[in-house]
């Protein structure tokens, strides 16, 4: 291992050590499951905003988005980013305050708990929501563990399985010890590290390409590369039309936000709902700027390849563009190697900030919603907290087992799980917060139809191609919303107590 590699490893180890320290620090503040899963509703506006967005973006921001821009230009990446930016703002503007007030009013501390108490349903909604979370979050968490393992294996030539397990142990340690507050605080730090990584990479890659003028000249020379209605086809080196159906399919990514448990929990946990306006502004600005920079990094990275500074990347290798640029940076001296370590820690941070939130959401579904609420297992506060921590550990073991194969897909799983949550929970959440007439039967039908349609569209309909080649989230979301409306109207209206609760929450 050369000096640059040692310095990179030192920077990463310092970062990982800080995460463990934070976990120990917050372990003393958890005296109940309410503290463990919602931090006692004590989050400030900055932590709420940045932890929500850091847990949302994952390594997709630093690997997937630049990789797409590197290969095919602005169009595909931009429409996806626009959809996500709109979804972020709409979720903060319309959902955040309502779910904060409503969840506190009915004493809900998890998403399944919210659905159950919102509709005065004892077990049905709790059980199916918890199962959906486990189905989609365990492989989602596994993909995060896999990304960490691949990063270390690629950089330092260490065994993938060993690297993945070590990263998983660190994530489990600070999450199981510190719970929601530790996860949220580390997410804030991780968002800062991710931001530093983005800024450093875009400046250095522009310099290595010969200046930003050269970057733009290179991009303009490629047919369709900077267009919003065409993509650049690297095989034929020509522009390929980007149809209106594909545009709507990419914009549909934004619908996923309405059903993301780890994002919605941040809304529920803020100390004062009146501070959500500040959180919304911080979150929206950060998301827009960070995604724009990530796309520009892909464009700069291609120019760096054209300049002969790094190899030309193809296929899924394009997702390692930031890793390649960081490796190039590490050859520029000791200080540059430390900066490269921070960049790579940023990729690790993006992955960890999502994995810890997913662990908490999946853990709460098992220990809180299945064991206690559905199966009626009564536990003391201390025993309940211990069960929560044990559940985090058990879920992590399953995720490690699923991620044991180094060739396992990371971003395909992320896309599928995002669609799953968006379709299964998004329409239910919107109806629960905005439609007094919705009832538990409509909510149940919506969750079930949304979750099933994700699989049906992904594996049966979408492979037909043509007009059917739409991201599964859009049709599944619309079908789930339709089921919610039809079944709610076809069955008995909610009783007076439910309607009264709805009106009280609405007035806040």
Image (tube, rainbow, N blue to C red):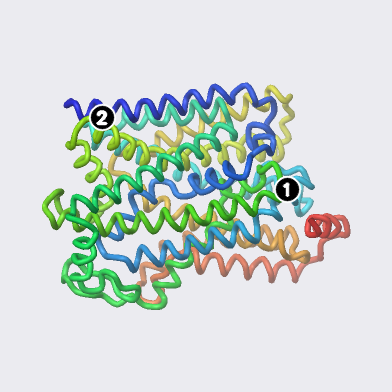
The answer to which of 456 and 313 lies nearer the viewer is: 313
- Residue for point 34% across, 30% down: 12
Quick check: 376 above or below 211? above
| Residue occupying the far right of the picture | 496
The quarter of the picture where the C terminus appears is bottom right
Indicate left or right for 162 with 357 as reference: left
- Label 2: which secondary element: loop
Dividing the picture into quadrants, the one containing residue 176 is top right
- Residue for point 49% across, 49% down: 56
Which residue has dot 2 on it?
159
The answer to which of 437 and 151 lies nearer the viewer is: 151
Dividing the picture into quadrants, the one containing residue 151 is top left
Indicate left or right for 95 with 198 as reference: right
Quick check: 36 above or below 369? above
Task: Judge depth for marks 2 and 1 and give the one in front.
Answer: 1
The quarter of the picture where the N terminus appears is top left
Residue 146 seen: no
Q: CA distance from mark 2 to mark 1?
A: 45 Å
Which residue has dot 1 on it?
103
Provide residue 416's location: percent of width, then percent of height. Answer: 44, 55
Mark before the other along the chain sequence, 2 or 1: 1
Provide residue 225's location: percent of width, then percent of height. Answer: 26, 69
Disc 2 and disc 1 in contact, CB within 8 angstroms: no
Dividing the picture into quadrants, the one containing residue 149 is top left
């Amino acid at each position: 291992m050369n000096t640059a590699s040692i310095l990179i490893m030192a920077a990463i180890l310092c970062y990982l050590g800080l995460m463990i320290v934070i976990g120990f620090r917050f372990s003393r503040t958890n005296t109940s499951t309410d503290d463990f899963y919602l931090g006692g509703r004590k989050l400030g506006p900055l932590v709420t905003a940045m932890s929500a967005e850091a847990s949302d973006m994952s390594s997709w921001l630093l690997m997937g988005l630049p990789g797409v821009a590197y290969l095919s230009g602005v169009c595909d990446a931009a429409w996806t980013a626009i959809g996500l930016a709109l979804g972020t703002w709409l979720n903060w503007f319309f959902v955040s305050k309502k779910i904060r007030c409503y969840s506190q009013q009915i004493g809900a501390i998890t998403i399944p708990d919210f659905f159950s108490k919102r509709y005065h349903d004892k077990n049905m909604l709790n059980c199916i929501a918890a199962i959906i979370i486990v189905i989609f979050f365990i492989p989602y968490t596994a993909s995060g563990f896999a990304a960490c393992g691949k990063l270390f294996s690629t950089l330092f030539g260490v065994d993938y399985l060993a690297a993945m397990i070590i990263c998983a142990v660190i994530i489990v340690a600070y999450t199981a010890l510190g719970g929601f507050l530790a996860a949220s605080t580390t997410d804030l730090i991780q968002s800062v590290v991710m931001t530093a990584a983005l800024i450093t990479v875009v400046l250095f890659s522009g310099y290595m390409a010969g200046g930003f003028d050269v970057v733009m000249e290179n991009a303009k020379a490629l047919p369709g590369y900077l267009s919003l209605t065409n993509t650049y086809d690297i095989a034929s080196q020509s522009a390929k039309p980007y149809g209106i159906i594909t545009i709507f399919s990419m914009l549909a990514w934004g619908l996923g936000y309405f059903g993301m448990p780890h994002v919605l929990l941040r809304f529920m946990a803020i100390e004062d709902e009146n501070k959500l306006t500040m959180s919304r502004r911080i979150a929206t600005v950060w998301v827009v700027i960070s995604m724009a920079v990530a796309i520009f990094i892909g464009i700069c990275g291609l120019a760096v390849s054209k300049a002969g500074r790094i190899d030309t990347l193809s296929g899924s290798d394009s997702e390692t563009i930031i890793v390649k640029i960081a490796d190039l940076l590490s050859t520029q001296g000791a200080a540059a190697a430390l900066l490269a370590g921070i960049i790579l820690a940023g990729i690790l941070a993006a992955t960890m900030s999502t994995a810890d939130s997913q662990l908490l959401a999946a853990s709460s579904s098992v220990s809180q919603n299945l064991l206690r609420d559905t199966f009626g297992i009564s536990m003391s506060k201390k025993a309940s907290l211990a069960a929560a921590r044990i559940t985090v550990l058990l879920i992590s073991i399953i995720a490690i087992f699923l991620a044991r194969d180094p060739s396992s897909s990371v971003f395909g799983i992320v896309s599928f799980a995002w669609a799953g949550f968006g379709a299964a929970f998004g329409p239910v959440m919107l109806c629960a917060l905005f439609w007094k007439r919705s009832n538990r039967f409509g909510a149940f039908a919506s969750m079930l139809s949304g979750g099933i349609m994700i699989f049906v569209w992904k594996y049966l309909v979408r492979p037909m191609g043509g007009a059917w080649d739409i991201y599964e989230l859009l049709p599944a979301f619309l079908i789930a919303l339709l089921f919610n409306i039809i079944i709610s109207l076809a069955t008995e209206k909610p009783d007076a107590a439910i309607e009264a609760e709805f009106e009280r929450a609405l007035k806040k």
